[in-house]
Image: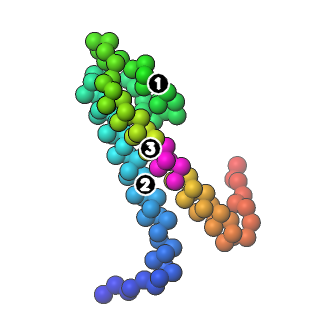
Amino acid sequence: MAAIPSAAEEDARRPNREHQRLTEEAGALISRMKSTLVRFGIRNFNVKLVKACERLDALRGPEGVPLPPNTLGEMRRDMTRLRLVREQMKIIEKTRQQKLIKRRGKAPTRWC
């Protein structure tokens, strides 16, 4: 039989679990955006770029037709959501680093 973790042990696991869920969500968003673009014949667009949202208006399918307005809106919302997920991941990672530094009592040393 497995031991039941204490409330403190369970709380200590929360950041790792949240980070894992956010990583999965980011992957799902990227896959969904890529598949949406492939449906319109666009295969050479990197949705992970920081300026990808700004470049959406210039996208054209093989026939030279721009993305439909509803698809364009969905892509913008997904890119905004992806940016938020990445920011949340950075916050968790930064907090994790600060806890490690605090636990060690000094800044980590770099190895050459």
Q: Mark 3 belongs to which amino acid?
A: Leu
Crowding around mark 3 (Cα neighbors within 10 Å: few <14, some 14 to 19, many 20+) is many
Of the numbered discs in the image, which one, if any, rests on residue 82? 3
Dominant SS in magenta = helix
| Residue topped by disc 2 | 22
Instruction: Compute the Cα span from label 3 to label 1.
Output: 16 Å
Taking the image as shown, residue 112 lies to the left or right of residue 39, namely right
Instruction: Residue lying at the far top in this picture: please name it.
Output: 63
Q: Secondary structure at mark 3?
A: helix
Which residue is located at x 44 percent, y 62 percent? 18
Identified by mark 1, the residue type is: Arg
Taking the spot 66% from the left edge, 72% from the top edge, the residue there is 103
Q: Who comes first in sequence, dot 2 or dot 1?
A: 2
Kind of element beneath mark 2: helix
Q: Earlier in the sequence, mark 3 or mark 1?
A: 1
Q: Residues within 10 Å of mark 1 (few under 14, many from 20)?
A: few
Amino acid at pointer 2: Leu
Q: In the rendered view of the protein, which quadrant contains the N terminus?
A: bottom left
Q: Quarter-wise, where is residue 22 in the image?
A: bottom left
x, y percent for residue 16: 47, 64
Question: For the magenta stretch, what is the residue range?
Answer: 82-88
72 vs 60, nearest the viewer:
72
Q: Are marks 3 and 1 in contact (CB under 8 Å)?
A: no
In the displayed structure image, the side of residue 65 where residue 90 appears, left or right: right
Q: Is residue 111 above or below residue 6?
A: above
- Mark 2 burial class by Cα count in 10 Å: few <14, some 14-19, many 20+: some
Residue at screen point 40% across, 39% down = 77
* Residue at x 73%, y 61% (from the top left corner): 107
What is the C-alpha distance between the residues marked 2 and 1? 25 Å
